[in-house]
Amino acid sequence: MATEETYTHGHHESVLRSHAWRTAENSAAYLLAHLGPGLRVLDVGCGPGTITAGLARLVSPGPVVGVDAAAEAVARAREGTGPAANLRYTVGDAYRLGHPDDAFDVVHAHQVLQHLADPVAALREMRRVCKPGGLVAARDADYASFAWAPPDPRLDEWLALYRAVARANGGEPDAGRRLLGWAHAAGLRRVRAFASVWCFATPRDRAWWGGMWADRIRDSAIAGRARELGLADSAALNRIAGAFRDWSAHPDGWFAVPHGEILATK
């Protein structure tokens, strides 16, 4: 992300807990078959580096750079993913990546474009640092497509609130469905579009997802921004947190998080 923009989730522990769960396998499966030893990879918006480290293992000894606008996320990545000779992390801006033209074989971004005021400009910058014939890869959630059971009007309230906060921050929470159009607008070629889903339905997964969101909706930057905008008060946020706790305890609880994905050629 760009340092001057607002990251809707912030960096509360509940957010970092979610990010640290992500791996190359559960969050970039559409890309993995295109990776191999020796490729140069840039991971834009790397967060705590758990996806980045997985990419580094797959392309070793090729160099991998993770970049994030948040210094605290970069510090956590450096501390948490372990040493690797081909991996480094830097603080940087998605609109000004600080690398020369054609520097990487693969430029990847996971859950980044949805938070940017100008995702097309970010894709153009990703295209710039990608070598001719290289791959630009992006994956973003599509909040309007989220689905769950059993139904609960409090979770409907949560989704409407999140989308309103994200848009007030200048982002696009339904980014998944827009990636193809954004890639075309950025001048990328041979754009292939896909979709995949995170699904939380086991007792363990429900406890993790529901507990994480119960904490996030009360304590993260989303909560503060919702109050600031007058979209929710503490009672409403506690009500939504209760919905996630109730959902996570329900034996029929099921939650699907669809994502759009693109692979494109410079």
Image: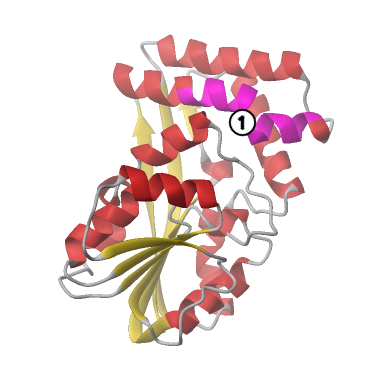
Q: Is residue 15 magenta?
A: no
Local packing at callout 1 (Cα closer than 10 Å; few below 14, some 14-19, many 20+) is: some
**Would you say residue 28 is visible in this rendering?**
no
Figure check: 60 above or below 243: below
Question: Which quadrant: the N terminus?
Answer: bottom right
Residue at 33%, 52% (x, y): give it: 51
Residue at 30%, 67% (x, y): give it: 64
Front in this rendered view, residue 263 or 144? 263
Question: Magenta segment range?
Answer: 212-227
- The amino acid sitting under disc 1 is Ser
Whole-percent x, y for residue 136 in the image: 40, 73
Front in this rendered view, residue 243 or 77? 77
Q: Is residue 215 magenta?
A: yes
Whole-percent x, y for residue 131 in the image: 37, 86
Relative to 232, 42 lies left or right: left
What secondary structure do most residues of the magenta stretch adopt?
helix
Front in this rendered view, residue 185 or 95? 95
Residue at 67%, 53% (x, y): give it: 171
**Dot 1 corresponds to which residue?**
220
Relative to 215, 227 lies left or right: right
Whole-percent x, y for residue 258 in the image: 44, 45
Question: Which quadrant: the C terminus?
Answer: bottom left
Residue at 68%, 45% (x, y): give it: 166
